[in-house]
Amino acid sequence: AQTVTQSQPEMSVQEAETVTLSCTYDTSESDYYLFWYKQPPSRQMILVIRQEAYKQQNATENRFSVNFQKAAKSFSLKISDSQLGDAAMYFCAYRSEMNRDDKIIFGKGTRLHILP
Amino acid sequence: EAGVAQSPRYKIIEKRQSVAFWCNPISGHATLYWYQQILGQGPKLLIQFQNNGVVDDSQLPKDRFSAERLKGVDSTLKIQPAKLEDSAVYLCASSPKAIAGYSYEQYFGPGTRLTVT
């Protein structure tokens, strides 16, 4: 069974600085998707960024980028120029390509604090 | 485009009572998910519907939890009777039907925070 591990329960970063959230996963599959979801205090979960395992190029979305290391099964999220609105819980998630049911497995999350 | 709607937003009940949550997915989304998110943990899938059929309910405690999605649109999740450990946020999400080679984003509702005393 696939697992997703986020080893940092909480992190803090100064506003305008860069922070990296870590995520590792375990799978025997070669085709899959990885996601980072953001859950602000209002609790509406939104997708931040996605990565297809077959793509070597790391995904980027404005100030958000990932470092995808397939062999190491590592998928970290880098937030550049941190803003107060980035404060939230961040969940790393995995979805198998083999299982067409679109089921997503979430990590336990990292709470990110932005210090003004 | 309207998002995923859930109600109520908050609910407090005593153990052994019953409770029901309602979810209205984004129009046209074939797949609907119910997640349980216990404080300090990531969401755990309880049940997944495709249209009005169940795709996966392997982690649904069927002795007390039930869910239905009549007509393939709205869905209700019921707990009867509730236990203290059911205190959590219940999230509903929806997405278009999955296709080979592409993973659609799941769109989440605001959740229902349940407190069982």
Image (tube, rainbow, N blue to C red):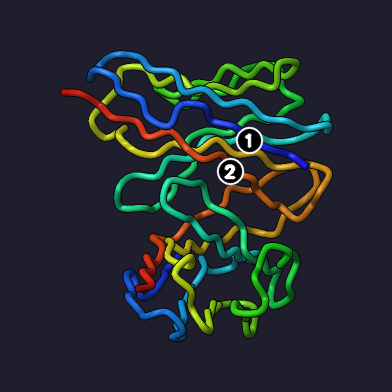
Q: Quadrant of residue B63?
A: bottom right
Q: Position of residue A45 (x, y in %)?
A: 43, 49
Residue A111 lies, in percent from the top left, at: 37, 34
Mark 2 vs 1: CB contact within 8 A:
yes
Residue at screen point 48% across, 74% down: B83
Task: Classify the position of the C terminus of chain A by image quarter.
Answer: top left
Q: Could you tell me residue A32's position as x and y percent?
A: 75, 35
Mark 1, residue position: A4
Q: Amino acid at mark 1?
A: Val
Q: Report how far apart the C-alphas of labels 2 and 1 lie in the structure.
A: 6 Å
Of label 2 and label 1, which has the lower sequence position? 1
Side of A18 relative to A15 (left or right):
right
Q: Which three-letter amino acid code belongs to the residue tagged 2?
A: Phe
Q: Which mark is residue A32?
A: none
Query: Could you tell whether A10 is left or right of B71 in the image?
Result: left
Regarding residue B2, the answer to whether it shows in the image is: no
Residue B33 visible in image: yes
Secondary structure, mark 1, is strand
Number of labels in the image equals 2
Residue B84, above or below A77? below
> Is the residue A27 above or below the residue A40 in the image?
above
Q: Which residue is mark 2?
A: A106
Residue B99 higher or lower than B67, as above or below: above
Callout 2 secondary element: strand
